[in-house]
Image (cartoon, rainbow, N blue to C red):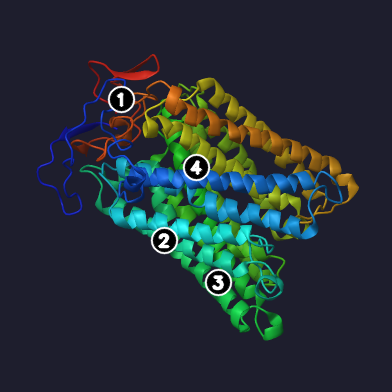
């Protein structure tokens, strides 16, 4: 992104005091600045009371990594149990609690908050030329709210467990389950407030904190994706909170809301739940799509193909995503004509997603593509997300959904979209921005190998489940006919390989902090304001307020950086494609 700089002399209302509170850091060409966000103030209290958006991103990263490991352990127990047709290691109630723990942890405590919490907090202000979020204290408060809700949730899983599945369907959850439904519901309710606060903060930041010249047509596509995600968070999350409150009211006071024996309607809960949970799919996937835009343009050395189409497709997904929740309820008795309407709308919501995939592919065409780890994860994302999207069309059609509903086909589709999509996008973003966040480069060999292992393990895990589901194997059952044993053994083997792949970054990324070479300011020769700051960034991101004069992906302009010994060095000449 071509920019010029001017000293800050007349800050606007929301751009108060761009002047750093400490002396300007001394920046080494290849090394980190002497004062940066990681070392400007030591001690645990400085972290727990910080209002620096970058540190808050790190505060999200640490517990999210722990929760992901916990959810992965629960998934491993499920897969190990399914090696034998009649269960290998778990009793019936233990199996129900294991797959419920896996689903709830991964969805509510990892997939939904991971990219907005970590990369959104860290990079949205930097990408638009701001020194911080619009409401820094509210940003810290949202982390505390999220952690409080997560603790309720984890306590519910540890002390008695939860056996309702991640959907909490009544009347079982409101009347018959003897597990910690109330505590888990309270955790979901509280974390929802954090989601809303984060969404409000990002929207206000994008509206009011953009640097001069940063028009809507010059916003990085990651910011567009985060903006659309924030709108969904604000509009959809209160509906889930309302559903959880009504569920708790029925369970505690015996008021007939969802339980038909008390005069309630269980379909009402499903409508409320899926009105949130289908847009929540895009809360998970839209930030990942935003990351993919940044990585593809960088490692193809090309401007994004169809910037406006990609940007507005994020908005289109956010809007149409609110109109398709009923395709989860085709077999609930909601009415065939209503089902037909939801089926048509489901086909429509696939269009903006397809726009993104076609534009990404067109961006590849003619590019100078290199295959560093972020790009390998990105290619994995596109392949797996495309398979997940195409198989979703079968579930969005009334006739085929009758046969495939509640089978392993649904599990495979969901994981290709959410795990194959979101997890690979998260890994792409983490590996892409790790040098900027830490100032250190990780192992190129081990990171590429991890990407390949994850892709192989994921495919071996879930491709057999498409076949098993097509042949009628129902999901969530601990026992199954013996003819499906080989399919489950293949899935368990794939899950083992996949788990090993996920453990690899947990080793080489922390090791890079101690043994990795200095990254320099721009190791990938990327465009964008965030790459004009030192690595790690200083406290206030920019010593001077940037003035934006070009779009975010001007790779066609002559670059003023060369790459030598893994570091970006400024050269004479060039009009500055950065």
| Callout 3 crowding tier (Cα within 10 Å): few <14, some 14–19, many ≥20 | many
User: Mark 1 or mark 4: which comes first in sequence?
Assistant: 4
| Callout 2 crowding tier (Cα within 10 Å): few <14, some 14–19, many ≥20 | many
The residue identified by callout 3 is: 243
Disc 2 to disc 1, C-alpha distance: 39 Å
Task: Indicate the secondary structure of the residue bearing disc 3.
Answer: helix
Disc 3 to disc 2, C-alpha distance: 16 Å
User: Mark 3 or mark 2: which comes first in sequence?
Assistant: 2
The answer to which of 338 and 417 lies nearer the viewer is 417
| Callout 1 crowding tier (Cα within 10 Å): few <14, some 14–19, many ≥20 | some
The answer to which of 103 and 218 lies nearer the viewer is 103
User: Mark 4 or mark 2: which comes first in sequence?
Assistant: 2
Label 2 or label 1, whichever lies nearer to me, is 2
The answer to which of 556 and 182 lies nearer the viewer is 182
What numbered label is drawn on residue 557? Answer: 1
Disc 3 to disc 1, C-alpha distance: 52 Å
Residue shown at 37% from the left, 32% from the top? 436
Residue 252 visible somewhere in the drawing? yes
The residue identified by callout 4 is: 356
Q: Is residue 398 above or below residue 7?
A: below
Residue 6 placement (x, y as % from top left): 14, 35
Disc 1 to disc 4, C-alpha distance: 24 Å
Q: Is residue 533 above or below residue 558?
A: below
Q: Is residue 36 above or below residue 283?
A: above
Residue 193 placement (x, y as % from top left): 43, 63
Residue shown at 30% from the left, 56% from the top? 137
Label 3 or label 1, whichever lies nearer to me, is 3
The residue identified by callout 2 is: 196
């Amino acid at each position: 992104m071509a920019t010029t700089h001017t000293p800050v002399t007349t800050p606007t209302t929301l751009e108060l005091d761009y002047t750093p509170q400490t002396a300007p850091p001394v920046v080494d060409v290849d090394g980190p600045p002497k004062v940066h966000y990681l070392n400007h103030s030591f001690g645990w209290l400085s972290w727990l009371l910080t209002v620096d958006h970058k540190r808050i991103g790190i505060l999200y990263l640490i517990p999210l990594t722990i929760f992901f490991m916990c959810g992965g352990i629960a998934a491993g127990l499920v897969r190990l149990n399914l090696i034998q047709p009649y269960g290998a290691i778990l009793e019936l109630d233990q199996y129900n609690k294991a797959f419920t723990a896996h689903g709830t942890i991964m969805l509510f405590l990892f997939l939904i908050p991971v990219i907005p919490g970590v990369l959104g907090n860290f990079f949205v202000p930097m990408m638009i030329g701001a020194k911080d979020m619009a409401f820094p204290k509210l940003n810290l408060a949202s982390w505390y709210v999220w952690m409080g809700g997560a603790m309720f949730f984890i306590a519910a899983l540890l002390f008695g467990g939860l056996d309702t599945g991640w959907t909490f369907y009544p009347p079982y959850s409101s009347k018959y389950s003897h597990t910690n439904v109330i505590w888990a519901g309270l955790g979901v309710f509280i974390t929802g407030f954090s989601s809303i606060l984060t969404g409000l903060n990002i929207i206000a930041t994008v509206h009011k904190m953009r640097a001069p010249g940063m028009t809507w047509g010059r916003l990085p596509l990651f910011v567009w994706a985060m903006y659309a995600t924030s709108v969904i968070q604000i509009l959809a999350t209160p509906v889930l909170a309302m559903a959880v409150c009504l569920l708790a009211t029925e369970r505690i006071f015996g008021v007939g809301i969802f339980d038909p024996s008390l005069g309630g309607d269980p379909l009402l809960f499903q409508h409320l739940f899926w009105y949130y949970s289908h847009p929540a799919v895009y809360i998970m996937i839209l930030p990942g799509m935003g990351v993919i835009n940044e990585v593809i343009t960088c490692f193809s050395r090309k401007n994004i193909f169809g910037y406006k189409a990609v940007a507005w497709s994020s908005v289109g997904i956010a809007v149409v995503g609110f109109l398709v929740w009923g395709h989860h309820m085709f077999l609930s008795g909601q009415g065939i004509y209503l089902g037909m309407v939801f089926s048509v709308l489901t086909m429509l919501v696939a269009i903006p997603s397809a726009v993104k995939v076609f534009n990404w592919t067109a961006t590849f065409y003619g590019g100078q593509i290199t295959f560093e780890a972020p790009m390998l994860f990105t290619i994995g994302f596109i392949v797996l997300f495309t398979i997940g999207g195409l198989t979703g069309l079968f579930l969005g059609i009334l006739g085929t959904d009758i046969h495939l509903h509640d089978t392993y086909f649904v599990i495979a589709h969901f994981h290709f979209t959410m795990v194959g999509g979101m997890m690979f996008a998260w890994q792409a973003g983490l590996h892409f921005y790790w040098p900027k966040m830490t100032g250190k480069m990780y192992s190129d060999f081990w990171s590429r190998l991890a990407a390949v292992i994850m892709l192989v393990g994921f495919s071996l895990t879930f491709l057999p489940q498409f076949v098993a589901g097509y042949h009628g194997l129902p999901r969530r059952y601990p026992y199954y006919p013996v003819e499906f044993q080989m399919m489950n053994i293949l899935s368990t083997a794939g899950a083992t390989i996949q788990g090993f792949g996920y453990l690899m970054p947990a080793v080489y990324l922390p090791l890079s902090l101690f043994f990795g070479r200095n990254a320099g300011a721009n190791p990938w020769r990327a465009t964008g304001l965030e790459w004009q700051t030192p690595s790690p960034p200083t406290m206030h991101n920019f010593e001077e307020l940037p003035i934006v004069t070009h779009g975010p992906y001007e790779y066609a302009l002559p670059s003023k950086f060369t790459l030598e010994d893994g570091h970006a060095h400024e050269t004479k000449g060039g009009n500055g494609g950065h």
